[in-house]
Image: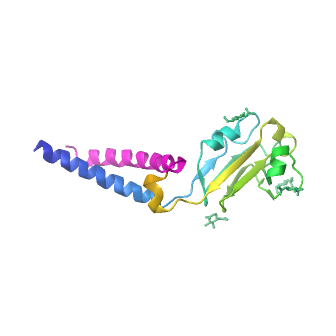
Amino acid sequence: MKEDKGLKSRGWWLMVVVITLKVAECGQPVLHRIGGGRNTWAPHTNFTQWSSQERFYVGDWLYFGFDKRIYNVLEVNSTSYENCIDKDFIYNVTRGGRDVFNLTVAKTYFFLSGRGYCFEGMKVAIHVQEIPPEQLLPNSSNGSQSYVYSHITLLAMLAVAASAWTFPY
Ligand SMILES: *[C@@H]1O[C@H](CO)[C@@H](O)[C@H](O)[C@H]1NC(C)=O
Ligand SMILES: *[C@@H]1O[C@H](CO)[C@@H](O)[C@H](O)[C@H]1NC(C)=O
Ligand SMILES: *[C@@H]1O[C@H](CO)[C@@H](O)[C@H](O)[C@H]1NC(C)=O
Ligand SMILES: *[C@@H]1O[C@H](CO)[C@@H](O)[C@H](O)[C@H]1NC(C)=O
C-alpha cells in the first residue's frame, strides 16, 4: 500500500514536470525590468552586472521606469555606448517614463541616458539570443537552462502544492 502511494505521487510529479516543461517550452516573452528595481532606470546602478545575470530572448521586452523630466532612454550603437555619446542615436525609447522596448532581433542592443547621465552609469548592453530549440532545452549548457528551470521549478512547486491540496495522501 505504501509503495502504491509513492508510485502515485511520483506519477503526479512526472505529470507536473511534463506539463511545466511544455509551458516553459512555449517561450513566453518575458518583461525585464531594467536594473530590477522599482525606478529601474537611474544613476549609480551597475546595469552591466544586472544584465549579465539575465537571459534575454527574441520577443522579450525591456521596461524602463524613470523620471522623464530628468532622464531619457536612447538606443545607440556600440561606439556611442562606449563613449556615452547621445547624438545620432538609433532610436528614442523615451515616451512617458514607463516605457517598454521590444527585443525583436538576436543581437546586442545598447541603451543610454543622454543629458550626461550615461557618465553616471546609465548605460546598458543587452545581449539577445534566439529562443533555444525545444530539443536542446534539457541539455543546453549555459544560462538558458537556469532560465527554463527557474520557471519549471516555480510552476512545479505550485502544481505540486495544488495537487497535494486536492488529493491529500
Ligand atoms: C559593474 O559590474 C561588472 C561585473 O560585475 C564589473 O566588471 C564592473 O567593473 C562594474 N562597473 C562599475 C562601474 O562598478
Ligand atoms: C514584439 O515582438 C514580438 C516577437 O518578436 C512580435 O511578435 C510583436 O509583434 C512585437 N510587437 C511590437 C509592438 O513590435
Ligand atoms: C555609431 O554611430 C556614429 C554616429 O552615427 C558613427 O559615427 C559610428 O561610425 C557608428 N559606429 C558603429 C560601430 O557603427
Ligand atoms: C525623445 O522623445 C521624447 C518623447 O517624444 C521627447 O520628449 C524627447 O525630446 C526625445 N528625445 C530626443 C533626444 O530626441
Residue sitting farthest toward the right: 87
- Nearer to the camera, 134 or 122: 134
Residue lying at 72% horizontally and 54% vertically, measured from the top left: 109
Specify the quadrant that holds the N terminus: top left
Q: Is residue 39 visible?
A: no
- Nearer to the camera, 68 or 4: 4
Tell me where residue 105 appears, x and y as whole percent: 67, 62
Tell me where residue 47 appears, x and y as whole percent: 70, 40
Specify the quadrant that holds the C terminus: top left
Tell me where residue 134 appears, x and y as whole percent: 46, 62
Q: Is residue 23 visible?
A: yes
* Part of the protein shown in magenta: 141-169
Residue lying at 81% horizontally and 44% vertically, measured from the top left: 71
Q: Main secondary structure of the magenta part?
A: helix
- Is 164 within the magenta? yes
- Is 156 within the magenta? yes
Residue lying at 43% horizontally and 45% vertically, measured from the top left: 154
Q: In the figure, residue 106 lies in which quadrant?
A: bottom right
Is 42 placed left or right of 5 in the picture? right
- Nearer to the camera, 100 or 67: 100
Is 130 placed left or right of 4 in the picture? right
Is 48 placed left or right of 59 in the picture? right
Indicate which quadrant contains ligand 4: bottom right
Tally the numbered discs. 0
Residue lying at 76% horizontally and 55% vertically, measured from the top left: 93
